[in-house]
Amino acid sequence: MKLVIVGTGYVGLVSGACFAEFGYQTICIDKDIQKIQKLKLGKCPFYEPGMDHLLSKHLNETKLLSFSSSLTDTIKDADLVFITVGTPSKRLNEDADLTYVWSVADEIAKNIKKYCVVVTKSTVPVGTSKEIKKIIGKLVPEDLFDVVSNPEFLREGSAIDDFMRPDRVVIGSENSKSEKIMKELYRPLYLRETPIVSTSIETAEIIKYASNSFLATKITFINEIADLCEVVGANVQDVSKAMGIDQRIGNKFLNAGPGYGGSCFPKDVKAFSSTAKKFNIDLSIINAVDKANQKRIDKIGDKIMKHVKNNSVISFLGLSFKPNTDDIRDSSSIKLANYLFEKGYQIHCFDPVAMDNAKKEFNHFRYFESAFEACNNTNAIIIGTEWNEFRALNFSEISKIVKTKKIFDLRNIYNALELEKLGFKYYGTGK
Ligand SMILES: NC(=O)c1ccc[n+]([C@@H]2O[C@H](COP(=O)([O-])OP(=O)(O)OC[C@H]3O[C@@H](n4cnc5c(N)ncnc54)[C@H](O)[C@@H]3O)[C@@H](O)[C@H]2O)c1
């Protein structure tokens, strides 16, 4: 099978490299020419564990993976064309901005020469894939293409493993021909007995938003429980642990913290709710989740301000929205750092891989080469992202260089008693 992937971002590149690992000839396309030039040299444009190896293997050794900035030359032999472009929130409202998706659909329509399956892998509101079908159908006879929805569930930071060993694959199709081709595509996963869920196109589109919104709900739920724990002297980590042992609940996504962020949850929760509104359905739980999560930064910021004097210098450890990625899109850490900066605090920060991205957008922070350096002569330390390298910081040395011994462990990765022994005032989340 020959595959073309349009949009070589986190999802497109990981999918492309992993499909090459399955053994398929795969061409990744992007309109960003600089990105394609870098990729042709084997340079991954973002940080993702394992990507450099996979890229070099399939670019240089197997030669199954290649890159191009033109869809015209590449699509003519393709059996499957994947749409993996971004679907951010619109500026003016909470809808998903589908500009990139429509533009790719237009381009595909102009270039199809033989039968192929057009696969929507971007996260798109229900009804989008059928619209894509209409756009392509204006220029291409019906028997020359099918449209399928195949939402992606990978997580940045563990994207390759998630793609190669997914919990499930969802295939939304409207005929057995395209469904069969999709099942053939994912045949390498049969060995692992990966569940393949075959549905209608609309169901597949909803599955993706319902999954992300549910996970966002779990996070928001435990964050509110954390607020209550803090006031009554309970410990949210123990609450989560005991709740999570119950198999009906499960222990994942039950860690209290500064609220969900990243390139998916915030925009997907909003888009899900605004899509439902168009069908006169009020997703009231999802609306409440969105509101509560938006308030979270102010709530945590205000808590910090109560304990740290204005104009103080704060060490901010971790800027990416989660560990093992350099993605800072909608990162709670960045939002909190900005909130505090606007209130008059100076931000001294460090992140193992996300600083280059942060420097491009936020030149009002001061950046340091290590967590240790970022803690020098400051009034409080905030752990914003739970990078592994922040889990065992040498606090007995750090206690000698800070001005004031205060730590806000937003991710609850430290033991309060141990830090208190070193003279730190410790503030966890929900305990
Ligand atoms: N990032 C994740 O963890 C993740 C996980 C699951 C699903 N998704 C969904 O997958 C989609 C892609 O997300 P992402 O994070 O990979 O986005 P991204 O912003 O990292 O990448 C999108 C890429 O598409 C390119 N592009 C835009 N228009 C194009 C065009 N007309 N032709 C060629 N290339 C074009 C951009 O230049 C960019 O490189 C989104 O819908 C997102 O919600 C993302």
Image (cartoon, grey):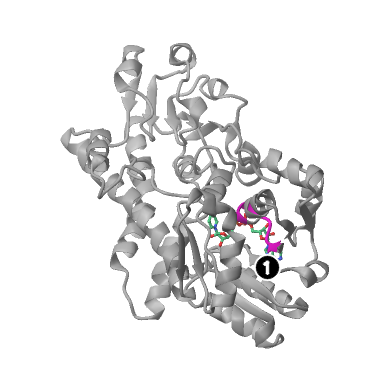
Residue 329 seen by the camera: no
**Residue linked to disc 1:** 81
Q: Which residues are magenta?
A: 4-11
Residue 109 appears in the figure: yes
Q: Secondary structure at mark 1?
A: strand
Residue at horizontal 66 percent and vertical 42 percent from the top? 51
Q: Is residue 6 magenta?
A: yes
Q: Picture quarter containing residue 368? A: top right
Query: Is 8 on the left or on the right of 410, as rendered?
Result: right
Q: Is residue 353 left or right of residue 263?
A: right
Q: What's under tag 1, amino acid-wise? A: Val
Q: Position of residue 94 (x, y in %)?
A: 46, 68
**In the rendered view of the protein, which quadrant contains the N terminus?**
bottom right
* Residue 226: percent from left, percent from top: 26, 41
Give me the residue at 69% from left, 88% from top: 141
Residue 93: percent from the left, percent from the top? 48, 70
